[in-house]
Image: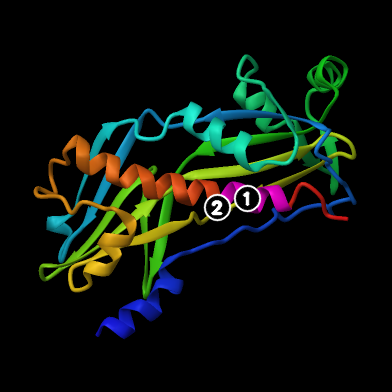
Amino acid sequence: MKKIVYGLVAIFIMLNFSGCSGPNLPQYKINKTDNVGYIIKANPKMIHTYIGTTIFNNFEKEYPKLIKEEDVEQLLKQNLDAKLINLATYDFNELNNLIVEKDDKWSINNNALYNELIKKYNLKAIIVVSEREGGIYMYPNYLSSKSSGLLTRSFLKIQNHFAVSGFHFKLNILNPKASKEFNRGMVTAKFIYATSVSKFQQESGFIKPKNDESLTVEEQNSIKKSILDLTRYNIKVVNKHLSNM
């Protein structure tokens, strides 16, 4: 039984980074000395999504924000090879939609903002980080969570726990113009506990909830570590896409 579960870990860790469909991406290269802006939008709450044996056992419960903007900001600074500039004073949606597809070409959605960012900061690109829905495929179903947090699948008292990172990454390239989105439609999740295998609990540092309907602060913090690990890995993948030459 243990060997089977170990072998399934690779399936449970879903790493799906794909560029968006649309116009072809031009060749671009962002160097370590280039300026790259970033903006982060995190959800106000963490969610524990519990999926039980029947729908009558299912529930969602919100907790205070687990991963803050400054946590993601620190990971960006530690793992991206570029000179980063915080654009938190700008409107999130305007930066997110600055480069759009139009008539099968990449176009500027706000010329005034585009010119300001080029002139004021000499930006080469913008990294947009948004926290949205996350989840994992657990054959034959897709288990989803509205945000980062803990996802529990319980069936006849056998429990599997997953840390879910709902952070999605988008790269708006200003020169040449293009846009590339990562984690589209699927987010990375990490298998952190199995009822029958204590090894996962030991490696992740996860503390199994004493009460699934009321997580303690200590239990929440044990989930935070796994979500930060997932987010760090994702940012390293984004870093590899700072150049396509």
Does the stretch in magenta take in 216? no
Does the stretch in magenta take in 238? yes
Residue 133 percent coordinates (x, y): 44, 46
Q: Residues within 10 Å of mark 2 (few under 14, many from 20)?
A: some
Task: Say which amino acid is labelled 2.
Answer: Tyr
Residue 227 percent coordinates (x, y): 41, 47
Task: Tell me the element at label 1.
Answer: helix
Which quarter of the rendering shows the N terminus?
A: bottom left
Q: Nearer the viewer, residue 3 or 44?
A: 3
Q: Which residue is mark 1?
A: 236
Residue at 39%, 43% in the rendered image: 148
Residue 118 percent coordinates (x, y): 86, 22
Q: Main secondary structure of the magenta part?
A: helix
Q: Residues within 10 Å of mark 1 (few under 14, many from 20)?
A: some
Q: Which residue is mark 2?
A: 233
1 and 2 marks in contact (CB < 8 Å): yes
Tell me if residue 148 comes above or below residue 206 in the rendering.
above
Residue at 48%, 56% in the rendered image: 188
Tell me if residue 27 comes above or below residue 112 in the rendering.
below
Tell me if residue 57 comes above or below residue 13 in the rendering.
above
Residue at 80%, 20% in the rendered image: 117
Task: Say which amino acid is labelled 1.
Answer: Lys
Q: Give the left or right position of residue 4, taking residue 179 as reference.
A: left
Which residues fall within the magenta stretch? Answer: 234-240
Which quarter of the rendering shows the C terminus?
A: bottom right
Distance from label 1 to label 2 (Cα)? 5 Å
